[in-house]
Image (spheres, rainbow, N blue to C red):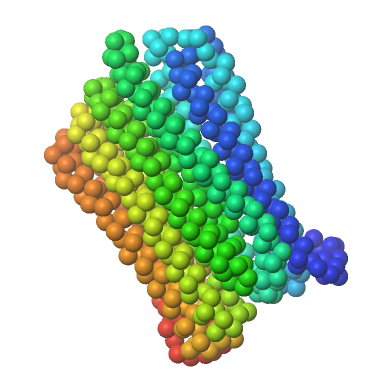
Amino acid sequence: MFVSAPVFQSISGVFVALILVLALVLQSVSGLIVASMFVLASVFQSVPGLIVASMFVFPPVFQCALGLIDVSMFVLEPVFRCISGVLVASMFVLAPVFPSIPGLLLASMFVLALVFQFISGVLVVSMFVLAPVFQSLSGLIVESMMFVFTPVFQFVSGLRVESMFVFAPVFQTVLGLVVESMFVCKPVFQFVSSLIVGSMFVFVSVFQSVFGVLVASMLVLAPVFQSVSGMLEVSMFVSAPVFQSISGVPVASSLVLSLVFQCVSGLIVASMFVLASVFQSVSGLIVASMFVFTPVFQCVLGLIVVSMFVLEPVFRCISGVLDASMFVLAPAFPSVPGLVLASVFVLAPVFQFISGVLVVSMFVGEPVFQSLSGLMVKSAMSVFAPVFQCVSCVIVASMFVLKPFFQSISGLIVALMFVLAPVFQSVAGGLVASMFVLASVFQSVSGVLVVSMFVLAPVIHSVSGLTLVSMMFVVTPVFQCVSALSVASTFVLASVFQSVSGIIVVSMFVFTPVFQCVSSLIVESIFVLAPVFQTVLGLTVESMFVDVVSNSTLPFDFVNSSI
């Protein structure tokens, strides 16, 4: 690093090369995510066909494979910790070097790229390891599966919980590095921000082609999702009398339902990655359209609105499959306590999807704010205001598209309360699992608030050369759009909270014996929610300093020096 520093300083066009390298890194990472999604999709497609083929022929093989996965988790844990420790150490060592060596930014990009490629490579390899295991276990009867398959699912669910604790410090370290890099690389980003506009003219054709491919893939994938959901719904009604006539129906039906939930959750995750890539490409098009392609951007926004209506029947079909599966497998529910745990894992990706969309929208708006630092106030007023209005309309439209999907999920939860009443009475541990689910939800919400603080901070500091009066014309439509999003999200969350309140009233009558025997959980919930309240309290203090900067009538230089 220190040897190559003068080399980076003496090479002309380093910043343009930096933009191109960063683009290639982002394209490779996104390509790995898409590839892993196709691998995961093929695994999910093969698993429902292999459900009857289970494990009386190769039980030692499968147990050995599961043991290797478990061992690999503990082997990789110190590796991840070592890598994260090296990254943290390098950040503090190179902190004084960063402001004077812009070339180090390129090196840090390569370091992060290797880390992400390593993590994604581990995931892809694990997929290919599990695929032949599932494919090799064929030709077995449902009755033979009942005695071996149940402990295997329990073991796999335990691995999921263990993997969360293994990867938790890794994600926390990466998040901390992002926050630290913002403060360390701030002068570098300010120096490079003027080159973003020039690079946009180079990447305009690339963004147009990428976005065209995404729109085409949306139209291609729409009938695929509809046909898959239709096949699931038909298979539920066809296989119902078969399961009812086989002895040991409750266990078999629970396994079928768990696989159906896994497939549905996989579809939700896949659609989330598709929408994330769309938002990322749209964010690049926003900056380009401000200078050259204003009518093109209006057409792109129209395509996004069309894609929302294309995806709407997909969500309705998925919710219909869930409703049908509830009525078909209702008689099997009272005798299968393990379905409570399955429902918890089904709800978890839904909340993760919501929080992921919020985080993605935050990062989408960040480069837009940063790219306006070198523009005149009048030109920003005439171009930027209609762009934000269009984007806000798209987000509000997506809220109304997803609303029936969330309503159907809330209806399923209420139905589960009445169906699984005897199950909940005998499974008090489900309350502990729900505590962990709520904890992750609160943590993700608090994380979104923290991210929004850092997103707004460079906006206020980047326009230090402008007067307060001229900035108000640019920021006013932004806050209006944010307030519109808040109102829209309030309507979406209102139905969710209403259903939750209904569940609480129902649970009062159903869970009376459960609450009597789980009084100690109240004390545990206090320890779980304590860091959440501490985070919210800290955010309140930080928002006071942000509001002082945004509402002050003093010049920005004076306010920055005071703070």
Q: Nearer the viewer, residue 430 or 523?
A: 430
Image point (69%, 52%), residue name: 25
Which x, y percent locates residue 502? 19, 47
Residue at the location (84% across, 69% down)?
A: 12
How many numbered marks are there?
A: 0
| Image side of residue 104 versus residue 231, left or right | right
Q: Is residue 545 visible?
A: no
Residue 312 can be seen, yes or no:
yes
Classify the position of the N terminus by image quarter.
bottom right
Residue 102, horizontal then vertical, whole percent:
75, 68
Q: Quadrant of residue 34?
A: top right
Q: Residue at x 56, y 38 (%)?
A: 37
**Image check: 87 left or right of 218?**
right
Q: Is residue 529 above or below residue 15?
A: above
- Residue 73 locus on image (x, y percent): 57, 34
Would you place residue 251 above or below residue 316 in this image? Answer: above
Front residue of 234 and 174: 234
Q: Position of residue 396 (x, y in %)?
A: 38, 60
| Residue 197 to residue 225: above or below | below
- Judged from this view, the residue extending furthest toward the left is 509
Q: Based on the displayed image, in which of its 4 quarters is residue 350 positioned? A: top left
Q: Quadrant of residue 417?
A: top left
**Residue found at x 25% / y 26%:** 330
